[in-house]
Image: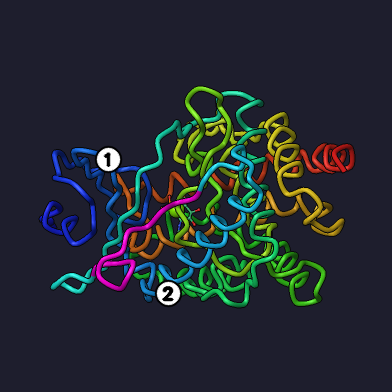
Amino acid sequence: MSYNVEKLAANFALGSKIVAITECNIGHINGTYFVDTENNRFVLQKINQNVFKRPEQVMANIVAVTKHIKKKIKAEKDEGNGCTLDFLRSGRNYYFYDEDGEYWRCYTFVDGKCHQACESTEIMTEVGRTFGNFQRLLADFDASALYETIKDFHNTVKRFEAFERTVEADPVGRVANVAAEIEFVRARRDICNLIVDGIKEGKYPIRVTHNDTKLNNVVMDKETGKGRCVLDLDTVMPGSLLYDFGDAIRFCASSAPEDETDLSKVYVKTEIFEAYAKGFIEGIGTNISEAELDAFPDAAKIITFETGMRFLTDYIDGDNYFRTGYPEHNLDRARNQLKLVADMETKEAEFKRIIENLK
Ligand code: GN1
Ligand code: MG
């Protein structure tokens, strides 16, 4: 489907004439375009309604959270705390609803560097600090005021149930190809409960969580290397900060990209786990409990496991959720993530020691 991006962008108050439009292909979910005007650069995105059933709720969450962060940063009068995304209005709303029933939104581009791969421990500490700081700035925001835009997004137990249902249905006849992967997942059924039960028992408080704490979702200052802004606020929801920590380790501390097929190249880098944890703990300050810190090693494993299981589920289901570049893409991603889980299992004691030392 091609869109008249220029016409769509014109529904937002861009302030000056559009001079160029470029499509951006990073990310598995939304359609993204850079819109350059005479004076500024904007990001126009089509919200994926297959994933986000209620785009207006996604935008309500984002607007509430970014307003809060803006207020906090202003009150703290600390330039070092960076900025947050600034969304443009279209009429009264922060989105434009087109004649095909699609939702579009537009925000001011934040200039800086987004690292696509982990280049050093210093960078990872800074990324950790930026996400920790994001949590800190939102620590006094009432998470119950947010919509749960993707229900049970990180409920690993429910994700496991969905996996089993898909295996049972085997809609495109792929189950036979993936017996080993299915067995790997089933053998780890027990870990699905750890965070879910901890939340139920009140051990892990419900906070505002980002839910997609990838390295490339942080904009860093090109000169100073300091974290400036957290991007991709679509999945900002009520949740546990363990999700955010775990997902960051899954993505940032891996030795290889998420779809590397040479599994001998895929392992978790202990020094990156440590560097990220150090920055995150510094950034969040006192807004974290001992129980949450103790669960960091498990969180990394659980979220990596969950993501591997989601890729595998989507593969078995016929690739309906994640954008894929080739037919076996989801399977390659699943194998990659499950390899990472196996490697994390061998490093648990080391991770625990690291967290104890950072406390
Ligand atoms: C999706 O689109 P992207 O890359 O930001 C997914 C995350 C997964 C990630 C895996 C809403 O994020 O949960 O961890 O792919 N986002 C959603 O690469 O499902
Ligand atoms: Mg995302």
Q: Is residue 50 above or below residue 347?
A: below
Query: In percent of the image, x 87 and y 39: which residue is there?
Result: 353
The color scheme shown is: rainbow
How far across and down, in percent of the image, does residue 243 sit?
64, 58
Q: Residue at x 46, y 64 (%)?
A: 62
Q: Return the residue nearer the eye: 133 or 182.
A: 133
Q: Which residues are magenta?
A: 84-96
Q: Amino acid at mark 2?
A: Gln
Q: Could you say which quadrant of the image residue 55 lies in?
A: bottom left
Q: Main secondary structure of the magenta part?
A: loop
| Quarter of the rendered structure image containing ligand 1 | bottom left
Left or right: residue 230 compared with residue 277: left
The residue that appears at 15% across and 39% down in the rendered structure is: 20
Q: In the image, is 257 to the left or to the right of 120?
A: left
Q: Secondary structure at mark 1?
A: loop
- Asked if residue 30 can be seen in this view, the reply is yes
Write down the residue under mark 1: 40
Q: Is residue 87 magenta?
A: yes
Residue of label 2 = 57
